[in-house]
Amino acid sequence: MSRDMLARVTSGTAMYNNSLAVASSPILTKLKSLYYRTFLKAYGYAGRFASVVLTNSTWTDSRIKAIWQVPTTVVYPPADLRRGSGEGPRRGSDLRPNLVVSLSQFRREKNQSLQLEAFAKV
């Protein structure tokens, strides 16, 4: 749940989190907006009790800060970003096939099929 999702519902935009039936009905839009606002308030309230908050990207970090209003720390994946960045050829033990690991919930907005299409082009 995010303020972005609430904005889509409130604006009447049909999308993965807002069916056309809801988007085209002012009454259903009001009810769903109320539900999202209530959920976001509860989520924000619960988040304020966290003693340590770690996020995995600046995108997630900005959303958590906006809703929870607590200090956060971004923890990036433990990866050597210089590898494969054109800083020289791979050698020795670095010679191995490319591997992508994608961990996420299976939800429409995650668009895993796009990840597969992109990986097929690598």
Image: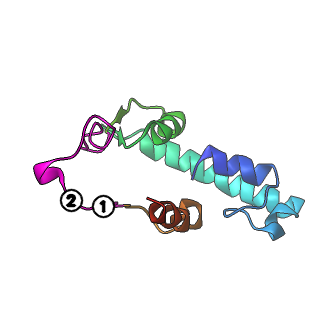
Q: Which residue does the numbered mark 2 point to in the structure image?
A: 96
Question: Residue 54 at what x, y percent from top left?
Answer: 33, 40
Task: Tell which tag, 1 or 2, sits nearer the viewer.
Answer: 2
Q: Quadrant of residue 70?
A: top left
Q: Which residues are magenta?
A: 76-101
Q: Is residue 70 left or right of residue 3?
A: left
Q: Residue at x 30, y 43 (%)?
A: 84
Q: Is residue 121 above or below residue 59?
A: below
Query: Residue lying furthest top in this view?
Result: 71
Question: Residue 96 at what x, y percent from top left?
Answer: 21, 59
Q: Residue at x 45, y 62 (%)?
A: 119
Q: Give the spatial CA distance, label 1 vs label 2.
A: 9 Å
Which secondary structure class fits the magenta region best?
loop
Residue 81 on the magenta span:
yes
Quadrant of the drawing holding the C terminus:
bottom left
Q: Quadrant of residue 23?
A: bottom right
Disc marking residue 99: 1
